[in-house]
């Protein structure tokens, strides 16, 4: 419903024509008082020319306390890979400016150009997909901060060398916070042979099962329901030694601490492109992922919303904003580039949501320095 949107959509068109928004065009609730001292983490970001997609993502990342604390505390410095430290260093400086600076608004230009050196598409001053930007940003932070771990596991009742398995994996603050694992159960419907495959993810792209209205749970059910693969989609069965009709079902074998949902609003089929404007209802607290998590891994199945990226307008244009919960004030804020307003909880649910950030643990205020 448009009545729940903090900004009527049409006003954004006017905003674009004028190039800057006049005060009359927004209906911010409890506009931040200019005489109030600057609140930690509530800092606007300058638009560098169609970079609202980046600003919305950076605001959501800046609301994730454990991530911010990792950078503010200086812990990132010991993990930093010398060969690709530019993006992570720029991110650390930006988080420091946003959390410890005195300014109501800062420029993300150094981070933007560091990432743009690796992904030139972002250097063009054209609108980009916020989800793609998020994945690239998380990838680069992971590459800069990853460590290799070798785990030795012995098989039960034996310590012989031949039974020792060495598993090498990479871990970073990014994988520790955002990485989950999907497990696919694949059943041949001819011989009932069952196999498993797993896949890691940092963003879960959810289908939208309705054109008008549905819930986030409907999207999740649609994603995790059993799928039957027929005709050209049949999978080769190693027992039958032929392609067979196959049933596939996904479950979460590892749920990340922070789970990011990408709502697949951009529907592209061949040359047909459209944006789904479905009003998707999502809870602010207690999103229960129990039905989708493998029973062995159900440790913290309840999640609370901490950030939303909104998309207004159409596929080729439009505008991004973010709603984020601040860990200091525990209040929600709307971030529209340099423009910030405090919003009530009831305004956080809108039909413009494109990315949702949920955490299974409450956030505390990020600590600046390590206690040594
Ligand atoms: Zn088979």
Image (tube, grey):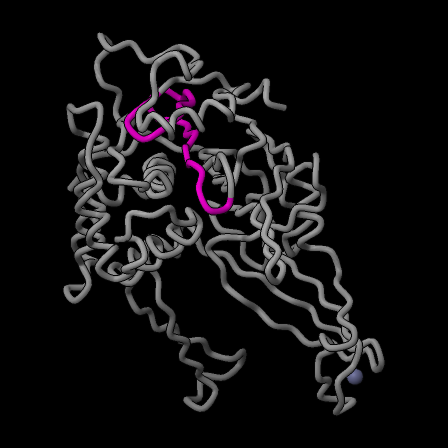
Farthest-out residue, front: 17
Locate residue 277, reporting x and y percent: 61, 37
What's the residue at 43%, 29% (across, down)? 323
Indicate the position of residue 136 as horizontal and vertical percent values: 35, 57
Residue for point 25% across, 25% down: 40
The answer to whether residue 324 is magenta is yes
Instruction: Please determine whether, in this image, residue 351 is positioned above or below residue 154.
Output: above
Front in this rendered view, residue 260 or 193: 260
Q: Quadrant of residue 268?
A: bottom right
Left or right position of 74 against 68: left
- Segment tinted magenta in the rendering: 315-340
Up the image or down, 237 lies above or below 329; here it is: below
Quadrant occupied by the C terminus: top left
Quadrant assignment, res 32: top left
Question: Quick check: 194 left or right of 367?
Answer: right
| Residue found at the very far right of the displayed protein | 190
In magenta stretch: residue 183:
no
Q: Residue 339 occupies which quadrant of the picture?
A: top left
Would you place residue 227 above or below residue 368 in this image?
below
In front here: 267 or 365? 267
- Seen in the picture, residue 350 relative to 134 is either above or below; the reply is above
Q: Residue at x 20, y 54 (%)?
A: 114
Please report the residue visible at 25 percent of the width from the left and 55 percent of the height from the top.
115
Residue 191: x, y in percent? 83, 82
Please state which of residues 106 and 194 is positioned toward the viewer in this rendering: 106
In the image, ligand 1 is in what quadrant? Answer: bottom right
The quadrant of the picture occupied by the N terminus is top right
Residue 152 position, x and y percent, is 40, 76
């Amino acid at each position: 419903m448009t009545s729940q949107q903090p900004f009527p959509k049409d006003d954004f068109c006017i905003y674009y024509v004028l190039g800057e928004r006049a005060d009359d065009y927004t209906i911010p609730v409890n506009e931040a008082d200019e005489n109030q001292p600057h609140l930690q983490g509530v800092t606007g970001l300058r638009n560098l020319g169609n970079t609202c997609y980046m600003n919305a993502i950076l605001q959501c990342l800046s609301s994730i306390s454990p991530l911010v604390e990792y950078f503010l505390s200086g812990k990132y410095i010991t993990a930093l890979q010398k060969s690709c430290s530019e993006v992570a260093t720029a991110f650390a400086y930006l988080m420091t400016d946003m959390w410890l600076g005195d300014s109501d608004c800062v420029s993300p230009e150094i981070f933007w150009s560091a990432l743009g050196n690796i992904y030139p598409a972002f250097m063009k001053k054209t609108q980009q997909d916020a989800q793609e930007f998020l994945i690239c940003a998380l990838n680069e932070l992971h590459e800069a901060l990853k460590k290799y771990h070798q785990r030795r596991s012995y098989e039960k009742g034996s310590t012989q060398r031949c039974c020792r398995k060495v598993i090498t994996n990479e871990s970073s603050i990014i994988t520790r916070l955002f990485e989950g694992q999907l497990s696919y159960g694949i059943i041949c419907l001819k011989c009932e042979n069952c196999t498993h495959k797993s896949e890691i993810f940092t963003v879960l792209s959810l289908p939208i099962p309705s054109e008008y209205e549905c819930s986030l749970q409907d999207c999740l059910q649609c994603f995790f329901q059993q799928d039957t693969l027929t005709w050209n989609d049949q999978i080769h069965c190693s027992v039958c030694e032929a392609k067979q009709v196959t049933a596939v079902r996904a479950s979460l074998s590892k749920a990340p601490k922070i789970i990011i949902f990408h709502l697949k609003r951009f529907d592209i089929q061949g040359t047909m492109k459209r944006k789904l404007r479905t009003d998707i209802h999502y809870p602010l607290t207690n999103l229960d992922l129990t039905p989708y998590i493998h029973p062995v891994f159900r440790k913290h199945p309840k999640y609370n919303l901490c950030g939303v990226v909104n998309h207004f307008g159409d596929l080729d244009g439009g505008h991004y904003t973010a709603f984020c919960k601040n860990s200091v004030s525990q209040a929600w804020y709307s971030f529209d580039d340099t423009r910030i307003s405090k919003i009530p909880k009831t305004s956080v649910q809108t039909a413009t949501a494109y990315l949702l950030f949920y955490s299974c643990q409450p956030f505390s205020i990020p600590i600046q320095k390590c206690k040594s």
